[in-house]
Image: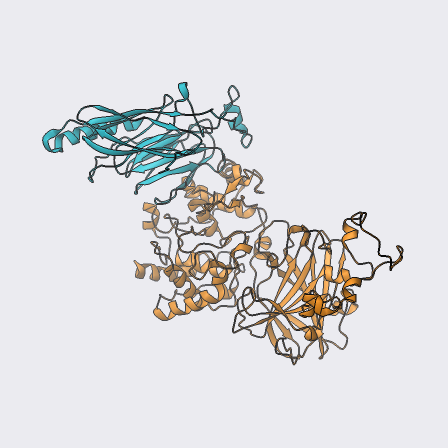
Amino acid sequence: MTRRYRAACAYALACGIFLCIPGAYPEDLLPPAAPPPSTPELLERGGLLFAKECAACHGAEGRGDGPAAYLLYPKPRNLVDGDFRIVSTWERLPTDQDLFATISRGMPGSAMPPTPQLSAEDRWGLVHYVKSLSPRAWPGGIGASGAAAAAGNQGLIAVPPVPELTQETRERAAKLFADGCAACHGTTGRGDGQQAQFDSDGFPTRPRDLTKGIYKGPATHESVYRRIVAGIPGTPMPMSDWASGEQAALLAQYVLELSSREQRAAYEPRRETLTAFRSDHIPGHPDSREWQSAAPLSLRITPLWWRDDSADRVTVRAMHDGSEIAIQLVWTDATNDHTAIRAEDFRDAAAIQMSPNTAPPFIGMGAKDSPVNIWMWKSERQASLETAFQDIETVYPNIGIDSYPNPETSPLEQPARHALTLKSAPVFVTGWGARNIVSDPTYRLSAEDLNARGFGTLSACPLEHQAIAAIGRYDTSTYSVTFKRSLRSANDDQLDLKPGATVSIAFAVWDGSNGDRDGKKSVTIWHELKIQP
Amino acid sequence: MCNVHFPAIALGLALLFAPGFAEAGNITGKVTFEGPAPEMKPIALSADASCVAMHTDKPLLSEVLVLGEGQSMANVLVSVTAGLPEKDYPLPSEPVVLTQEGCRYAPHVIGIRVGQTLRVLNPDGLLHNVHSAPKSNTPLNKAMPKDLLELETVFDKQEEPFPFKCDIHPWMQAWCAVFDHPYFSVTGADGTFAITGLDPGDYEITAWHERLGKRTATVTVAEATDANAGFVFSKTPPASPK
C-alpha cells in the first residue's frame, strides 16, 4: 500500500491540490516531489519540533491540553483521539498531504499558525510525528485520484475535473446550494442559517461565512470538493456523499465564487520582511511626517480567540538613524479603551516581540534556550500619565459621596496622580518596594520592556533598564502607536540591534472592549526585521 | 417495534441447540414514573419555517419524558446486562428503521444489533443531517437533502445508548444502543416491555432512560414462564445507583 501511495504522490503533487490556484500558495509551502518516508531520524526530528512548535497548545502528548490551550478558540486539536477536520478520504481520515497542508498553511479561522519558518523536510517530520501519536488506521500518502478509489467509495476521494460555471450550471449549483447547504450557511452563503451548533467536544461553533474567503483547508477546487463530500469531522458539517461527482464539483466552484481570490489569499499569511529604513531624522510620534518616507507593510493578524469582527491587519513601518530605531503599528479598533478601573474593563494595547534568531523560537513567548524581548504599549498607562488622569471617581462619579473630605487639601484642589502613594515610603508599598514596574508610582513610560523564555515566563526587565518611549494616538477608529528605543543595548535582557542585522519580529494587539487581556489577543506570525546598514 | 422478531428466531435456535431442550422463558414488565410529572414544553420550531408548518394543529412537545396512562413511561430501554452465555446470536435480516418525520425522530429510542442495518428515512422533503455521537463506533454525519429519501448504516461494536441529532434542527434527538445479543426491548406508550426467548437462569436486567439514568434488577427466569420485573423511575436517583 505504502509504496503504491508514495509512487502516486509524485503525480499528485505535479497536478494536485497545491497547484490549482497559481500564486495562492507560496513556493516554500509546496510539498517536495516525493514525501520523505518516515525514518527514525525524521521521526525524532519531528518529535523535537513538536515539543518546540506545537506542545504549548496541543500538549506534550498531543491531547490538545497544552498550557496555552485555554486561550484558544477554536480549541487545539486532540491529536490522539480527536477528529481531524481536514480529511480527503471516504473513511474521513487525513492523508499525509492533508496533514502537511494543515501544518504548512495553518488553519485560517483559528489560532493554528502556518509554519513558513520550517523547511519542507521539517514539516514532513511533524506529519510523521503527529501520526505516531495516535494508533488510528492512517490512510498514508495517497496520490493520484485513481479509478479504483472512485469505484468503491474507499480511500482517497476522487475529484472530477473543474466544471465551467455557465448561466445554466450556475443556476443548477445555486439550487443545489439552496437544497444542501443553505440551511446552515444561509441562502446568501453568509453563514446566517442555523446558528445554535456545537462541535463534538461540546464547544459552540457556527457555519462559515463563505463570502469572507476563510478556508480551514486549502482554498482549491479539489480541497473544497473534498470538504463537501467528506464533510468536516467533529463539526456539524456533514458528509454529502449524495453530491459526489458532478454535483459536488459544481457546488465547490459555486462556493469558491462567493469570495474572491484576493480575499482568500489574504488569509494565507506568509513570512514577510519589514525593512527599517535608515534616515537622518526618525519619527518620535505617530503623526511625524518622517513616517511618510518609510514603506508600510501590511500584516495579517489573527485573534487567538476567534471572532469575526476583529481587526485582521496591522500596518507596520520601521526607521532608524544609526542610534535609535522607531517602529510604528497602525490598526483599526472601533473603541478607544484606555481605562481599566471597573472589573469588567480591559484596555487596548500593542506589542512587538523580537528574537535575535532568524530561526525564531515558538511564537508564544519563546523558549528556554531562545528568549524573546517584548515591547508593550498600554493605552491606560499612557492615559494615566496625562494631567487629567482617569480615576475611580471618573467612572463612578458619586462613589465618594459618603467619604470624608481630606482636611489638608481644598475641595477645589485636584489631587495629583498617586498623591497618597507618593507620600508613603516604597518599602511599605510592597509592589513598589519590590521594584515592580506596574506598582511604581514614579514610572513615567507608557510602554514596558519585557522578557520571556517560554510560555508562562513573561517578566519585566529591571526598572533601570526600562527605556522604551512609546506614544499612541487614537482617532476615528484607528490606533497608531510609535515605539522608539536605542538600537544598541548593553544589557543581557534586552535585544541588541545593529545596523545591517536581521532579527525575527512579531506583533500583537489587544482590543479591550472585546475582552482582550494578557494572552487573549490578536497576533501575527514571525516575520523578519531587516535593519538597513 | 422491529426487535420483537429477533427473540423469536433466537428462541428457535436456542431450542435447537440448548442442551436438554429446556423451554425458554420471558421477562416482561412495566416501567412507571413516580412523583409529580413535569410538564413537557412545546419546542420552538422557528429555526425552520417548514417544520413550523408541519405542526400547526398541535405543538411538538419535548420527548425527554413521555408518560402514558397511570404515569407509564415510554422510551425506556430494558436489556439483559448479565447472565447471558457468550455465543453468536443469529442476526435479523430486517433493518431497524429510524424516521425523520415532522422534524422529529421516530422512534425516539432504538436498540440495534452489531452488524444489523439501520435504515434512516427522510420523508420530510427537507435537508436533515443524520449525526450520531457514539464513543466506540465510528461517528456518522451525513447530509440528507430533500431528494435523498433513505440511507443505511451499520455499527460494528456494541455500545451504550448514544445520541443521534440533526444540527440543522437542534431539537431533534434520538438515542441508539448497539447490542451483541437480541435481549432488549424499548417500552411503548403503555410502559411495557418484553424480553423473550431466554434460557432458564438468573439474569441482571437494566432499564435506561435518557434523563433519569439506569435502574437494575435481578430476575430468575424459569422454564416456559414469564418472569415479571417492573421499574419505577423518579426524579431522585435510587439510594445505590448502579
Q: How many marks?
A: 0
Give the quarter of the image for residue B197.
top left
Residue A255 image point, x, y percent: 53, 45
The image quadrant where one finds the N terminus of chain A is bottom left
Q: Residue at x 55, y 58 (%)?
A: A268
Residue A260: x, y in percent?
59, 51
Compared to residue A75, the image places residue B44 above or below, namely above
Measuring from the top left, give residue B168's x and y in whole percent. Answer: 50, 36
- Of A24 and A2, nearer the camera is A2
Give the position of the C terminus of chain A as an image quadrant: bottom right
Q: Is residue A464 visible?
A: yes
- Chain B appears what colour? cyan
Indicate the quadrant where residue A326 lies.
Answer: bottom right
Residue at 23% across / 37% down in the picture?
B83
Q: Is residue B152 visible?
A: no
Location of residue A322 with respect to B24 vertically, above or below = below
| Residue A257 drawn at (x, y percent) | 55, 47
Q: Is residue B73 left or right of residue A393?
A: left
Q: Which residue sits at x=55%, y=65%? A: A363
Q: Nearer the viewer, residue B126 or A393?
A: A393
Residue found farthest to the left: B20
For residue A460, side relative to residue A87 (left or right): right
**Camera-side residue of A426 and A374:** A426
Lateral position of residue A356 relative to residue A101, left or right: right
Q: Which chain is orange?
A: A
Asked which colour scheme the image uses, the reply is: by chain
